[in-house]
């Protein structure tokens, strides 16, 4: 991951971060901040791991199949 990709992910959550100040209680602020930070972490992790395969059971190589 490049610095630009990292910054793009963080900037995509910027609007949500700006809206955090409108919370009525400290509990709501903490909850919303946690949700935004979890979203950033999820996006970063997905970027590092790559695309999710369509079928989780699909084997990666035919060499892994046993011959009868």
Image (cartoon, rainbow, N blue to C red):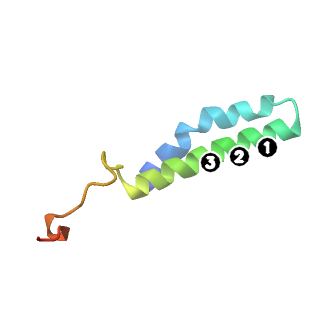
Observer-nearest residue: 12 or 4?
A: 12
Quick one: label 3, few (<14), some, or many (20+) residues within 10 Å? Answer: few
- Disc 1 to disc 2: CB gap under 8 Å: yes
Q: Is residue 37 left or right of residue 66?
A: right
| Residue at 26 percent of width and 54 percent of height | 58
Which residue has dot 2 on it?
34
For marks 1 and 2, give the CA distance.
6 Å
Q: From the top left corner, tell me how far across and down residue 10 is, in percent.
A: 55, 45
Which residue has dot 1 on it?
30
> Which element carries disc 2, helix, strand or loop?
helix
Q: Is residue 48 left or right of residue 33?
A: left
For marks 3 and 1, give the CA distance.
12 Å
> Which element carries disc 3, helix, strand or loop?
helix
Observer-nearest residue: 10 or 60?
A: 60
Q: Quadrant of the N terminus?
A: bottom left
**What's the mark number on residue 21?**
none
Q: From the top left corner, tell me how far across and down residue 59 is, in percent.
A: 24, 60
Q: Quadrant of the C terminus?
A: bottom left
Up the image or down, 21 lies above or below 65; here it is above
> Which element carries disc 1, helix, strand or loop?
helix
Q: Is residue 34 left or right of residue 48?
A: right
| Residue at 67 percent of width and 42 percent of height | 35
Q: From the top left corner, tell me how far across and down residue 32 is, in percent.
A: 73, 38
Quadrant of the rendered image containing residue 63: bottom left
For marks 2 and 3, give the CA distance.
6 Å
Q: From the top left corner, tell me how far across and down residue 54 is, in percent.
A: 30, 45
Quick one: label 2, few (<14), some, or many (20+) residues within 10 Å? Answer: few
Taking the image as drawn, is residue 2 in sight? no
Taking the image as drawn, is residue 24 in sight? yes
Which residue has dot 3 on it?
38
- Earlier along the polypeptide chain: callout 3 or callout 1? 1
| Residue at 69 percent of width and 33 percent of height | 18
């Amino acid at each position: 991951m490049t610095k630009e990709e990292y910054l793009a992910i963080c900037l995509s959550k910027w609007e949500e971060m700006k809206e955090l100040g409108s919370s009525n209680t400290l509990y709501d602020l903490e909850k919303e901040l946690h949700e935004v930070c979890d979203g950033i972490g999820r996006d970063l992790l997905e970027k590092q791991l790559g695309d999710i395969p369509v079928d989780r059971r699909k084997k990666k190589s035919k060499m892994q199949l046993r011959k009868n």
